[in-house]
Image (cartoon, coloured by chain):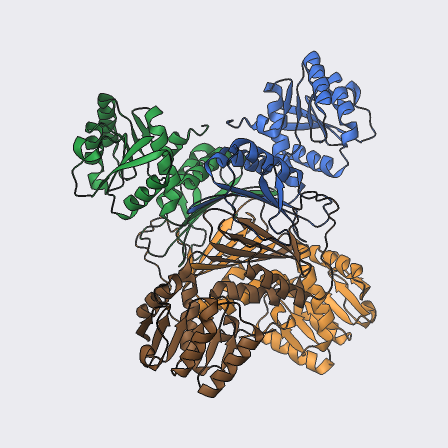
Chain colours: A blue, B brown, C orange, D green
Amino acid sequence: MITVAVSGAHGRMGSTVVQAVSAANDLELVAELDHEDEISTDTVRGADVLVDFTVPAAAQTNVLAGLAAGCHVVVGTTGWTPEAIDSVRQAAVDSGRNVIIAPNFALSAVLAMHFAALAAPYFESAEVIELHHPNKLDAPSGTAQATAKKIAEVRGSAPMPDATEHDPQGTRGGLIDGVRVHALRISGLTAHEEILLGNPGELLTIRTDSFDRASFMPGVLLAIRKIPQLQPLTYGLDQVMDLPGR
Amino acid sequence: MITVAVSGAHGRMGSTVVQAVSAANDLELVAELDHEDEISTDTVRGADVLVDFTVPAAAQTNVLAGLAAGCHVVVGTTGWTPEAIDSVRQAAVDSGRNVIIAPNFALSAVLAMHFAALAAPYFESAEVIELHHPNKLDAPSGTAQATAKKIAEVRGSAPMPDATEHDPQGTRGGLIDGVRVHALRISGLTAHEEILLGNPGELLTIRTDSFDRASFMPGVLLAIRKIPQLQPLTYGLDQVMDLPGR
Amino acid sequence: MITVAVSGAHGRMGSTVVQAVSAANDLELVAELDHEDEISTDTVRGADVLVDFTVPAAAQTNVLAGLAAGCHVVVGTTGWTPEAIDSVRQAAVDSGRNVIIAPNFALSAVLAMHFAALAAPYFESAEVIELHHPNKLDAPSGTAQATAKKIAEVRGSAPMPDATEHDPQGTRGGLIDGVRVHALRISGLTAHEEILLGNPGELLTIRTDSFDRASFMPGVLLAIRKIPQLQPLTYGLDQVMDLPGR
Amino acid sequence: MITVAVSGAHGRMGSTVVQAVSAANDLELVAELDHEDEISTDTVRGADVLVDFTVPAAAQTNVLAGLAAGCHVVVGTTGWTPEAIDSVRQAAVDSGRNVIIAPNFALSAVLAMHFAALAAPYFESAEVIELHHPNKLDAPSGTAQATAKKIAEVRGSAPMPDATEHDPQGTRGGLIDGVRVHALRISGLTAHEEILLGNPGELLTIRTDSFDRASFMPGVLLAIRKIPQLQPLTYGLDQVMDLPGR
């Protein structure tokens, strides 16, 4: 039985984590911390693992406090600088506990990106479509950007076939490292990505749909279960999933 | 039994029409004209219907010659001016024969556009994706443009929800009459269109795939069979299909 | 301003209706009735329209009570016999008020079925895939059954091409009036249907996704707004939407 | 420059290989053998690689003849018994040349199956849809069967969630090693497969489309280019692609 503390337990993500941990037979929820509560040996109540889904600004402080309180720490916030990651790694080594930082906990999104990178060297054409709810401020999504960059990295420099001469309205989408990315904003959708890879006569499509926050829970639970066996610092859920690399 | 003559019978579309007419039990192929052959009472050999898939430049001349030779005429070329259409209509009235001009003979493409127009008034969001082979020179496709315009026409002026503030690479696609259109060019594809219509909690997707020229044949055969009962001039396969209109 | 009363206002659907009506500028919520509350002139507080999403067993009683209380009535329950519908129609005529009964209020689902019926006569092949969450007890869904029946009705008796000779596991799905229906049960999904229509060289796909109960609200609001102008009894949201028929 | 001989060069697949080899800058076509021609040192004209797409009955004889003529051999036929494979392996070892046997040369189909196997352990639900032209005699396709078996193998024994109690028409598809498989036969389609993997709140979809024989050429060319560096016997294009395994 792995014991778990959740910080930010009353936030939207935190409360979903509380539910998911409570429902898992092999995990025991021992502490729910509000975002205002201090993280300390007292408050984490001996938890093996602290899960932190508070705000990016507090993430580094929370991780260090979690390590100091004797926990492995799973963090879901983004915006980490290389320096912050280094400082967390050092603290993890010193404490004998491990940290997982992941920008995206949706297994299907992580797998889609990984598969796109494995497949891209074999195809002439690759384009990315991302579809989100219309309240999103940025286009394209961070995941689509990361996907395009990964495809570009593995493809090498061969240009994709494209005879387009006239595109007065800019319908061919945006170029990210040479890969076309298209962003749709549609009422009713949540977060979706589709990667199309084509050769003469064939098409490979990889699509990931996140319908709600529950989509992050299998990834969070996986991280909780695996963290004791990992390195002091692991960045990215693909590393936790131990996907065969390229 | 309807008798049929095909002009441009050795071109790519024409030879496909020849095959399709020959394979149909209720149609009889009586004449195959090369694009250099004159269209006359002699050469059409008494055909009830002349099908013309030559080049736009020759289309009007061919239609008038076909009418003069006593045929109903089905034409698949594009680029007709209103004046040319009027002149053909008058010639049709005078000859007692009928003409069908259709920019697109793929039933699924015609239906997709028609359904998009019927559905659009009921949805907050509507965007169009078109996907083609990478040898296409223009983006977006004529069909995608026509689809976006039709959607815009029936939606009225209510803006679609879209909170996008940052889109440095232009990934949100091109605007056609207020409707976002996205064009993909992928090896292996032929001609495809997808229309997404969204409301809170629901999505309607209408997709049409044309895999090869055979996709135009059901539309051509339908036109051949229906032309005797139609008006002197019919523009658009949707009119031939007698789809319930809006 | 149309005034609205909601019965079953604390149930799952009812409370969603309460929210949707409250959020609409042209509608005013004047009464929320619990499923135990009596529906009467007193309790509906002069509402123009009563919306009832209680249980099938109570539906007829509630409609009659709503008419007696002077309301038009919009009902979302299923399981109506022809006799019950007739008796409601008579009561509506007598009261000078109108009733809308709809088994499905999702606009996209109603449109998908309607479009499938318009398109099916033009295609050789038609099959239906429905995808739902794994807690569903019945396969296929009522909507998929209704879709298959509608397709069968308009196609006539021409058999679909299918050379299958060996299918030991029964992978070709179930036959409903000669139309193949395939049911998937997948974690993460809610309620989805895809209709595929094929001819040589072309495919038309119509897909509807319902992600949550919010998907029924545009249909409910449409019914509330249109009911004063309709017949005494309207069955099916497609009738409310005034879709061009066949 | 790798020199290539093609046997069955006037068959449907063979002639497509002839075209693809001729169009590749780094390959030289030195011999086209009819299916009646003998394969010998004389007829292969010193080719480094022999590509054989004749009939299963002739495949083993052709491979042995190709090895004897001093060629590496790429074979696309199916129906190999373990004994036949062993005998070919031994002949390859003796001759110092290599053999690749692949049941499917479509890169996208091979990748789709490989990715499904990598992803399946992370998902509660997995089902397979395969879609083909209506002239196919067997359901499901060999690729869909192989995909289902691979998914079953990596999933372990945990049952998928499925509350279905009533399915009178058999719409839930066929069970292959515990994985539901659905087969569609639709005019206009060629060979397509879609694998759906679901967890609460998320879906991963992997889809492969083969539109025509050209889809096998990138796989064939890859095999020709890699065969000199491989083992005496390689079975399956995934082995040639050096995909990271599980």
Q: Report the front residue among B76 and A16.
A: B76
The residue at the point 71 percent across, 72 percent down is: C226
Quadrant (top left/top right/bottom left/bottom right) for the N terminus of chain C: bottom right
Tell me, yes or no, if residue D137 can be seen here: yes
At which x and y percent is residue B75? Answer: 45, 72
Is residue D157 in sight in this rendering? no
Q: Quadrant of residue C30?
A: bottom right
Q: Is residue D18 left or right of residue B207?
A: left
In percent of the image, x 61 and y 63: which residue is there?
C104
Q: Position of residue B24 (x, y in %)?
A: 33, 70
Q: Choose between D74 and B36: the one closer to the eye.
A: B36
Q: Is residue C149 left or right of residue B19?
A: right
Furthest-top residue in view?
Answer: A94
Observer-nearest residue: B15 or A29?
Answer: B15
Q: Nearer the viewer, residue D96 or C141?
A: D96
Residue C174: x, y in percent? 42, 57
Query: How many numbered badges does the structure rendering display?
Result: 0
On screen, residue D130 above or below B156? above
Q: Position of residue A235 (x, y in %)?
A: 64, 25
